[in-house]
């Protein structure tokens, strides 16, 4: 998908896997006819590095010694304080298992002179100046005092040279002939030993990137000169760079990622013109289209969110500016030399969000529709296949192209005189080559079917092998009692669909009997719902609805009836699917899905642990009420003998990053485990998705500690004489890290990186779990924030990769562990379609697939 | 119509009514105040929602009326799914067996504290952060600060307890009634 979707919402995988397409919005069935091209590979037993016994490695001297300054209240130690009373004697987070692979990354090493010291000053202007640009301008006149190298961000000043006095007063004059007194106060020094040093490095880099004539939009720099026009879609793509300098495992590294900014050439005025066709509803239409949009104003390059529309005012209205009443028309003409064309348009109102905490709480910004460019993609655009393809042609880059662009960036930075000057002034040098490192590839996993085991192959895709296999578990009597609802005029499609379903079902050991057929006269939502009520009396195991198109309302109503009112799993199939020439492969997928929705399992992997419960958690925002969100939790039972999953969902607040009622959900899962296995799980592996790395510390304080403590109580209460073994792993899909092989390819599925680009203060690793044919694969980052699970880094990594094989909508690996993918799917279904908590009777079935 | 309104809604800290913040900052704030006031104001954690911190006298009433109670109620009052025996299968054998393994966890701080790297003082109070940075400079051998400048008088060791004594304590007062 496009780079615009980065962040929490980023879809999984750049490739063409159905999991990514089935995540957002109600798209009843997006089965792809599989034009599978993967060759069957024989069990490629990759040579594993000589199996060193886990845990026993050469202990380095620092083991056990408390961190420096034992008197210092180190909050970090708290992280492990609660349970981990043993000395931590695992001295490395690097694993050894798997085949070595040489990789390149999108990182550059930074070479700075070691004895380097930055002087930090605070700058004040009298009278005060609002505009940062003006502040900068006035201060830059004094570069003779400040030395050639200084960085000024509007308030803080960083220099390489110490000023003579701790308090310097200067006089300055702005272009508007106002005299200012500048006070520069010494704050302190910033040494290379503290994290503020890294912030300054980032500022310096940005400053030098300005030399490349880049423009700052949001937080990143983009290149307007290299923009790509997509005229037919009223769009521009601006290529840009996302850079960050951070402390990594051993060195300070610069991570550079090539991104694109989608700029719509459309203005809010264009939207207004579209609404004007219907004068009676103009105001209402315009409001619904515009409220909540984020707009960009070219004249000052700022973004605003539109909160209201003022139809009572026009650009001719006046406002008070410096004591005088000025009309908007005159203001823009004099200040920015912009002539407003339509002088009758309404005005937009934006409340300044960031300043809500300050005194200017009610500060409002008034904007002119004509000057506001719309940003972001609408849902309509996202669904526009032609547009998305046109965009991805430019945004999706294969590794080769990406590497070239990274080198170009580096060359430009090192050859543009302006940039070089900034860098040399600060004594900063970038290495020219991308950083190379060693990764490891875990050998292909075995997929366990009922009668046989097959290797997932090097491509980690077993679509082909699946056709000849019998599913691991199916209902004893097959799908014996079920119903279909279809419009009368689609009887032919229904027939072909049912025939194919039964045929593929037989092949997979899943016996599908003839269903009760309900023919409906029209395809109205109400008719489907009434038909479902009729079906419910037959107590069917499943209801299949054949629908003419992916209408959201109908889909939601069917799902609501099924999940909330009746506790019957439903399967919605569009007519188009039934008419597709590749029906057989689609029917295979539907049959697998139906089997899962009944609570049975198509396949499993080999697990080296018994009594393991894997849990995934994710949050989705409610589509109807923005203050609400739904958190989905999916937990596996003991997958060695009972390959089923428990799913639960709870409402939570959209304002909270951390889950408030996570324990309740986990407790339900534990009760269920105990009910099925008569004991609590020996080990719990918790994958937490949907949290940004910025709130990790809070996560540990707020969620993890709470869970660890309550878990302990739960085990005591249950009379278990063992301590719970828990690992809490934060999953991040949206990191900027990229890996390429030496031959400019994507690394194979199962590649693990746990060194060099990881972070020293974390127990983290990267896994590339998918094979991607188009574009560059983006690895998933895993961060073990808490662990008493008693597994070595090697084992945790391997287990994580194994867990990526169990998403049953896709006969291949997913980008995140299956439980996370399920949790996300569940939360999304509830948040966008159901808006209520589903019936508990369904909790052991993957009804939301 | 205006959905920005609700997200910028201001809320009050359960520990100190003088603390007002945006709704979305509440969780972050509670973590800090919980630490600051843990000995002063004993608030009880609602079993249904971690962000509900309730003074003892009101606790019972709250557990009755908490809106997240429905999560448990939904669980208790609806029938759970029966166990399907045919969904179970024979134990899947695996090449490896880690059941007896018990490797202690890797603690990144042990490495971080000894390596030549910049550490981040995240989520700690300002005074502690200052100390942290000082220690870090010492650790990484960047001591020229102390050489150049006269030693400033050591900052008075103010424990968190002391500083909180003077603060306004809404719930304790109410509890004394």
Image: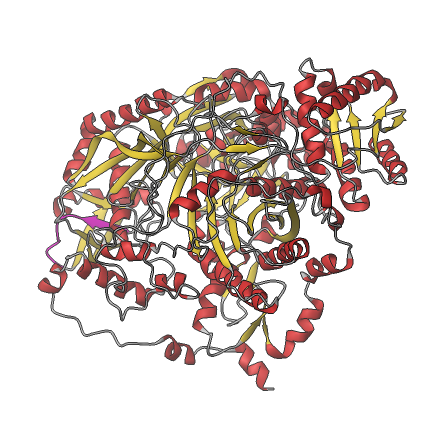
| Residue A732 horizontal/vertical position (percent) | 46, 42
Number of numbered discs: 0
Q: Main secondary structure of the magenta part?
A: loop
Vertical side of A484 occupied by B168: above or below: below
Q: Give the residue at the far bottom of this rendering.
A: B177
**Residue A30 among magenta residues:** no
Q: Nearer the viewer, residue A734 or A206?
A: A734
Q: Which region shows up in magenta? A: A156-165
Please indicate whether residue A133 sits to the left or right of residue A705 in the image.
Answer: left
Quarter of the view holding residue A734: top left
Picture residue at 72% right of the left edge, 46% below the top: B85
Q: Nearer the viewer, residue A586 or A135?
A: A586
Quarter of the view holding residue A277: top right
Picture residue at 37% right of the left edge, 50% below the top: A763
Q: Give the residue at the far top of this rendering.
A: A581
Q: Nearer the viewer, residue B12 or A287?
A: B12
| Residue A685 horizontal/vertical position (percent) | 51, 50
| Residue B160 horizontal/vertical position (percent) | 38, 75
Q: Nearer the viewer, residue B23 or A150?
A: B23
| Residue B59 horizontal/vertical position (percent) | 64, 74
Observer able to see residue A623: no
Please indicate whether residue A415 sits to the left or right of residue A85 in the image.
Answer: left
Vertical side of A628 occupied by A557: above or below: above
Please indicate whether residue A346 sits to the left or right of residue A609 in the image.
Answer: right
Q: Quadrant of the C terminus of chain A?
A: top right
Observer able to see residue B23: yes
**Residue A164 among magenta residues:** yes
Quarter of the view holding residue A407: top left
What is the image's colouring? secondary structure
């Amino acid at each position: 998908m496009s780079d615009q979707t980065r962040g929490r919402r980023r879809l999984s995988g750049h490739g063409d896997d159905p999991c990514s397409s089935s995540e957002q919005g109600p798209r009843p069935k997006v089965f792809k006819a599989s034009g599978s091209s993967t060759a069957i590979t024989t069990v490629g037993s990759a040579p594993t590095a000589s199996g060193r016994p886990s845990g026993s490695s050469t202990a380095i001297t620092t083991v056990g010694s408390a961190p420096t300054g034992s008197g210092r209240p180190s909050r970090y130690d708290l992280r492990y304080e609660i349970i981990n009373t043993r000395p931590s004697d695992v001295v490395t987070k690097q694993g050894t298992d798997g085949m070595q692979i040489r990789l390149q990354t999108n990182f550059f090493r930074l070479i700075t002179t070691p004895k380097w010291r930055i002087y930090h000053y605070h700058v004040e202007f009298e009278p005060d100046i609002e505009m940062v640009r003006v502040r900068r301008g006035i201060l830059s006149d004094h570069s003779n005092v400040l030395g050639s190298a200084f960085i000024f961000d509007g308030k803080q000043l960083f220099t390489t040279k110490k000023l003579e006095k701790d308090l310097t007063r200067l006089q300055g004059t702005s272009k508007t002939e106002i005299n200012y007194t500048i006070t520069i106060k010494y704050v302190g020094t910033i040494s290379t030993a503290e994290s503020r040093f890294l912030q300054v490095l980032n500022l310096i880099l940005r400053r030098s990137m300005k030399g490349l004539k880049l423009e700052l939009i949001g937080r990143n720099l983009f290149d307007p000169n290299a923009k790509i026009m997509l005229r037919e879609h009223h769009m521009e793509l601006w290529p840009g760079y996302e850079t960050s300098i951070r402390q990594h495992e051993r060195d300070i590294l610069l991570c550079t990622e090539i991104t694109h900014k989608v700029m719509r050439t459309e203005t809010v005025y264009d939207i207004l013109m579209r609404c004007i066709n219907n004068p009676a509803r103009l105001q209402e239409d315009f409001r619904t289209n515009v409220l909540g949009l984020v707009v960009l104003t070219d004249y000052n390059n700022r973004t605003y969110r539109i909160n209201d529309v003022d139809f009572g005012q026009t650009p001719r209205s006046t406002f008070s500016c410096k004591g005088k009443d000025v009309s908007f028309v005159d203001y823009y003409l004099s200040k920015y030399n912009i002539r407003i064309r339509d002088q009758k348009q309404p005005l937009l109102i934006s409340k300044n969000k960031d300043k809500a905490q300050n005194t200017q709480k009610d500060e409002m910004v008034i904007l002119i529709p004509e000057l506001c460019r719309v940003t972001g993609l609408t849902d309509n655009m996202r669904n526009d296949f032609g547009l998305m393809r046109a965009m991805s042609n430019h945004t999706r880059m294969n590794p080769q192209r990406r590497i070239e662009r990274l080198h170009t960036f580096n060359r430009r930075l090192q050859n543009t005189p302006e940039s070089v000057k900034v860098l040399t002034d600060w004594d900063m040098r970038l290495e020219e080559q991308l950083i190379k490192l060693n990764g490891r590839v875990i050998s292909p996993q075995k997929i366990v079917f009922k009668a046989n085991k097959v290797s997932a192959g090097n491509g980690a895709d077993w679509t082909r092998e699946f056709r000849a296999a019998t599913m691991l578990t199916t209902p004893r009597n097959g799908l014996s009692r079920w119903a279909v609802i279809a419009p009368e005029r689609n009887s032919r499609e229904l027939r072909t669909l049912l025939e194919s379903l039964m045929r593929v079902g037989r092949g997979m050991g899943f016996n599908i009997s003839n269903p009760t057929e309900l023919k409906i006269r029209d395809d109205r939502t109400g008719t489907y719902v009434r038909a479902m009520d009729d079906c419910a009396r037959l107590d069917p195991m499943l209801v299949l609805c054949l629908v003419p198109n992916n209408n959201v309302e109908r889909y939601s109503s069917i799902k609501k009836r099924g999940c909330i009112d009746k506790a019957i799993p439903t399967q919605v199939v569009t007519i188009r699917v039934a008419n597709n020439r590749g029906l057989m492969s689609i029917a295979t997928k539907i049959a697998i899905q139906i089997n899962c929705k009944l609570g049975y399992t198509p396949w499993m992997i080999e697990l080296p642990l018994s009594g393991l419960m894997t849990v995934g958690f994710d949050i989705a925002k409610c589509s109807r009420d923005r203050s609400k969100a739904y958190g989905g939790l999916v937990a596996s039972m003991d997958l060695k003998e009972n390959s089923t999953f428990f799913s639960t969902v709870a409402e939570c607040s959209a304002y909270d990053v951390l889950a408030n009622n996570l324990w309740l959900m986990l407790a339900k899962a534990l009760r269920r485990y105990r009910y099925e296995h008569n004991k609590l799980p020996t080990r719990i592996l918790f994958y937490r998705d949907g949290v940004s790395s910025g709130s990790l510390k809070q996560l540990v304080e707020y969620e993890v500690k709470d869970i660890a403590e309550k878990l302990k109580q739960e085990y005591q209460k249950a009379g278990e004489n063992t301590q719970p073994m828990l690992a809490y792993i934060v999953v991040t899909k949206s990191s900027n890290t990229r890996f390429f092989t030496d031959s400019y390819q994507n690394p194979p599925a199962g590649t693990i990186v746990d060194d060099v680009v990881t972070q020293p203060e974390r127990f983290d690793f990267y896994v590339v779990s998918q094979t991607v044919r188009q574009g560059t694969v983006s690895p998933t980052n895993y961060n073990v924030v808490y662990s008493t699970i008693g597994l070595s880094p090697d084992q945790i990594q391997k287990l994580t990769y194994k867990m990526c094989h169990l998403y049953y909508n896709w006969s291949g690996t997913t980008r995140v562990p299956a439980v996370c993918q399920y949790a996300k799917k569940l939360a999304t279904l509830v948040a966008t379609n159901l808006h209520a908590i589903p019936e508990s009777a369904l909790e052991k079935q993957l009804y939301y697939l | 119509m205006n959905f920005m309104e609700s997200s910028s809604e201001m809320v009050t800290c359960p520990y100190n009514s003088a603390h007002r913040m945006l709704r979305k900052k509440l969780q972050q704030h509670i973590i800090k105040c919980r630490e600051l006031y843990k000995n002063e104001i004993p608030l009880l954690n609602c079993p249904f929602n971690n962000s509900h911190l309730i003074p003892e006298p009101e606790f019972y009433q709250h557990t009755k009326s908490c809106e997240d109670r429905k999560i448990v109620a939904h669980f208790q009052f609806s029938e759970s799914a029966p166990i399907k025996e045919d969904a179970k299968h024979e134990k899947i054998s695996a090449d490896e067996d880690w059941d007896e393994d018990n490797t202690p966890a890797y603690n990144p701080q042990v490495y971080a504290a000894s390596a030549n790297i910049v550490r981040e003082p995240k989520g700690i109070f300002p005074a502690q952060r200052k100390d942290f940075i000082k220690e870090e400079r010492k650790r990484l051998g960047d001591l020229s600060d102390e050489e150049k400048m006269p030693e400033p008088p050591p900052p008075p060791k103010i424990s968190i307890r002391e500083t909180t004594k003077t603060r306004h304590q809404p719930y304790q007062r109410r509890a004394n009634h």
